[in-house]
Image (cartoon, coloured by chain):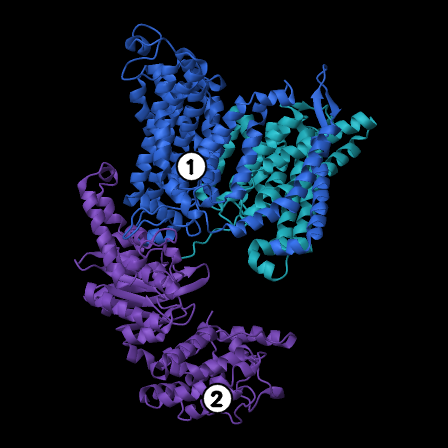
Amino acid sequence: MVSEVQNNPTAILRVERLSMKFGGLIAINDLNFEARRGAITALIGPNGAGKTTVFNCITGFYKPTEGMLTMTRQNGEEYLLERMADFVITKKAKVARTFQNIRLFSGLTVLENLLVAQHNPLMLSSGFTILGLLGFPTYKKAASDAIEKARFWLEKINLVERADDPAGDLPYGAQRRLEIARAMCTDPELLCLDEPAAGLNARESAELNKLLLDIRDETGTSILLIEHDMSVVMEISDHVVVLEYGTKISDGTPETVKNDPKVIAAYLGVEDEEVVELIEQAEAAGVDDITAAVDLLSTEALLEIEEAHPDMAPAALIPSAPAKVRRTRATAAKKPTVKSATDTTAAKPAAASTVKSKPTNPAAKPPAAIKPGATANALAEPRGGKADKLIVIKGIGPVNERKLNEHGIFHFDQIAAWKKADIIAAEAYLAFDGRIAREDWIGQAKKLAKQSQVTPAPKKTGGAK
Amino acid sequence: MADVQKIEPDSVFAKAVKEGLLAGALAFGLFFLIVGFRTDQNIRNELVLNQRWGLLAIFVLVAAIGRFLLTAYITPWSEARSKNKRAAVEKEQSAFRKSFPKIGLGLLLIYPFLVILILWAYNGSIMGGLQGSLKYVDNFGIQILIYVMLAWGLNIVVGLAGLLDLGYVAFYAVGAYSYALLSTHFGLSFWLLLPMAGIFAALWGIMLGFPVLRLRGDYLAIVTLAFGEIIRLVLINWTVVTKGTFGISGIAKATLFGIPFTPGPTGFAALLGLPNSGVYYKIFLYYLILLLALLTAWVTIRLRRMPIGRAWEALREDEIACRSLGINTTTTKLTAFATGAMFGGFAGSFFAARQGFVSPESFVFLESAIILAIVVLGGMGSLVGIAIAAAVMIGGTELLRELEFLKRIFGPDFTPELYRMLLFGLAMIVVMVWKPRGFVGNREPSAFLHKRKMVSSEFTKEGHG
Amino acid sequence: MEYFIQQSINGLTLGSIYGLIAIGYTMVYGIIGMINFAHGDVFMLGAFMAMIVFLALTTFIGGVPVVLALLLMMIVAMLLTGLWSWTIERLAYRPLRGSFRLAPLITAIGMSIALSNFVQVTQGPRNKPIPPLVNGGITIYGTNITVAYKQMVIMFVTVILLAAFWYLVNKTTLGRAQRSCEQDRKMAALLGIDVDKTISMTFVMGAMLAAVAGTLYLMFYGVISFTDGFTPGVKAFTAAVLGGIGSLPGAVVGGLLIGLIEALWSAYFSIDYKDVAAFSILAIVLIFLPSGILGRPEVEKV
């Protein structure tokens, strides 16, 4: 992987063996990827996968524990970002960024925000303030140029009319656009956007897509973005890198990534509010706009919502939700690739039908027979007719739980008792390798088994921590 | 509210009576010991207790009646008033407000002559006018302008860059002692030492600022306070150089391009054929400090339109965003610190030339607190507001010295000066509670595209360090 | 060595007083993030109250046992100073809650100026000496180290108060309310905690500790003046920051450290520069440990 990355001259940013540890917590573990010049690279993954940490390492806000971040500028200059201070990265290496929770200068006007972004060239032309203070014409010229540049970007983001209003007074979507324009005013070669579509409605999201494509095509700026909004990711990115638990699990074009079983497995673990968000967005945008991700997620979302809020009045959720699922299913039928993706996850052709029957009540109807390939201590059905909530174990999502149930695993003590051979067997049907040991399922299960004897296990979504 | 009160006037009255009684009881508790008894030393230097029940009764009554009136009449009245007249007044004031700086500046320019003319008319002789004006030019004009200049200097640090500096008086002291020491030891002239004092103070600003500027918020505040105290304590204790608490006296006066303000034949009065008087020097000093203050204002206004000034304000709004835009926050903070310190140094050397005497007593924390209070009361960042605040706070307390008629009311033992700082402190509280954002809370943008609109104070931030 | 121990004992005595004042700073900072500049003057006011109570006792009653006198001084000073602090918070700080961060700082500075000048106006500008309350001391056997009884009283009272205070903060409903307000005021309010009352109580508690510190200060030095609020106040604030502002054990540790630094510096170097030493050490500590000794490091959220 490393050598392949190093030999690629089209990469604007190479991330090699990047690791970031916060005390005992490993936020990023040995990450390698690259962003191509002139392309839009998306960094996706469930919450807490370490995406923002990657950004903070790239832009110098964190010093990575290990690894190399090489930025190659258009003129061939190479910068090792991990060795540079944050402001130097923007100034010299020409990497600009936006923030997940918008960080505008709310008391400055929209125009001033864009002028602050042109600080370094203006400092030079003002002779580090001294010439400017004395009223030298070079600064006057530079200052009016700066305003023109700001006007250009304001026109781009459709905010010329509001140029003299305080940035804090803008609506949310406009603030997001302004933050992007402000970053662009630093003349970056790589623009890092941290969830630019978060909180935008469908129309604003579409505008954002256009803006980002414009930036890429007109200024040649490469874009690296973190995004949860799959409509943005799948529509505009040229390349997608998927993170989970700080490790890269997939890398490739949007098409390949969305069919990658590992990605699907990881995404089934996303938190329920995001799923709801996705469903809502899909609904707002009309059925045709539903992306593959939504398609895949919707059924699982219901499962998960039910798991997470069993005490919630089901009437609020269930009646409308299955209808939605059916609708998405109907569109999914037109997309064979997606369908097959679902099938690979479940590792058997009957998956679709199982899924369909599930939403009504997954826990009450455990499959009667144990599937082949089960571990030694498999049970035909849960003891006392009630299975433990296996999703409490970090790393087990609803899908895995279902698979485990199908393979006769219902209780924490069963997992706790797994031997090496059992782990291999379980990993075989769960379709991932090494995760059981890495996430210490056995240890977690042992603890939970002990707890469950005393108190009922706590409720928790399957979302990654 | 007004309607409710019309329906139930009794309940408001009853409430007011109750609150008045409570306030009286509270006042009794608060003042019982500290006002009811006065400790005095007798001839054997022992403390004896004198009882002052009458005074205590006055305090309690004032509190009770005041609270009663407030609840029963003033609050309903002001609520009704603010309801009726919310929108009406705004427009009328703006025309006056716009030209206010110009009118103020004009008044400042003719102030000494205005005073002389008025007193001339009042006394009937030019000498009477000249001598009489001494007090007004010195105590009011010069005194207020020194604070205006200091507050404008501190405004760069606190108001623009958002760095809370509680030790600003240290730079004032550096300027004053630079002038005092260099002029008494080396006989250097004021005009040479004025810029040098500024440079020294700026250097001190950088020296002190460098280690502490990475501290944030209140930590920065306490360290700057500590530095202010350290400098004062060194001035007290380093007696070999500073003569300790005795201070340095006999400091050379400033000259007008080499013309001294002395009574001799080469003096200013003799050269112009004017009668001998100390007032010329005061008038000269008045214009000197006016010039220095205007220089501060001019530099501040210019700097705000330069990249560095914008970076200061951006720093106040959001430091992390600044760094993401390639702004070196350390040097930006340092320049703010040094620029502010430099003006403090100028003011200090002026102070030494005016007094002819410096001692550590003039540089206590209280001075820093007063200057900071003026900046905040005026409205951070607003030059006009700060000037108004300085005139009100300093002029007001100076005025107390003049109130001879109070002696006629309270008896000849009454010394209004005793109450000067008490009233100053109370005024600080009252003004702040009344206008938390200061007299002029709105911010004027440094650049505009269509129209210069004031930025409301609800958007501006006050910085975190 | 004996000299060192002797000076350390002196330093710890002084440090106890600083620690008691510092708790008031640190609690208020912890709960509303504001530097209560008037706290030093509240301490001075407490000392004045104790002084007047003492004079009233000797004038109106005559000979009162020392222990009883001290106890009465402390209790009256605590109650009245608490009342003062409550009023100050109500008038000068509460109207500004939720407003601009510097506004309450300015009212606090204004309050500090007003308080000290109020005391000057009502009680006169001169020093107020009282006859020594507690005399004598013990010499530790076989050494020249003496511990004055008044030093023992100070340490004893400090330890008792800190224990009581620890109990109050960690084991009572009020303490829990305080800690929850410290974490998240809005959430605490949503959960039904009376935030305003909790904050008021914090001010009152801080002022009570300051009043005790004032009484002890008066007993130790035998004199008080209206200007005596500033220096101990700034020292105590320095102590609070040194220990890590917001941390209660930090305030005590910081206070003891500042006391030790002052005493040892005066003993071995120069008494003139003892305050310079204390402030310099503050600056140096903060440069290397930006959140103080026991403070929680501030994580920069990006």
Answer with left or right where residue B136 lies relative to residue C155: left
Farthest residue toward the left? A75
Which amino acid lies under the numbered mark 2 shown in the image of this protein? Answer: Ala
Q: Quadrant of residue B50?
A: top right
Q: Chain of mark 1?
A: B
Q: Which chain is purple?
A: A
- Badge 2 and badge 1 both on one subunit: no
For the question of whether residue A108 can be seen, the reply is yes
For the question of whether residue C1 can be seen, the reply is no
Real-space Cα distance between discs 2 and 1? 79 Å
Image position, residue C95 (x, y; %): 57, 47
Answer with left or right where residue A51 lies relative to residue A236: right
Label 2 packing within 10 angstroms: few (<14), some (14-19), many (20+): some
Label 1 packing within 10 angstroms: few (<14), some (14-19), many (20+): many
Residue occupying image coordinates x 60% and y 58%: C189
Q: Quadrant of residue B33?
A: top right
Image position, residue A167 (x, y; %): 36, 56
Secondary structure, mark 1, is helix
Image position, residue B145 (x, y; %): 40, 28
**In which quadrant will I find the N terminus of chain B?**
bottom right
Residue occupying image coordinates x 56% and y 58%: C186
Q: Give the label on residue B386, or none.
A: 1
In the image, residue B187 above or below residue A199:
above
Which amino acid lies under the numbered mark 1 shown in the image of this protein? Answer: Ile
What residue is disc 2 on? A374
> Residue A256 versus residue C189: which sits nearer the camera?
C189
Q: Quadrant of residue B411?
A: top right
Q: Which chain is cyan?
A: C
Secondary structure, mark 2, is loop
Residue occupying image coordinates x 49% and y 82%: A303
**In which quadrant will I find the C terminus of chain B?**
top left
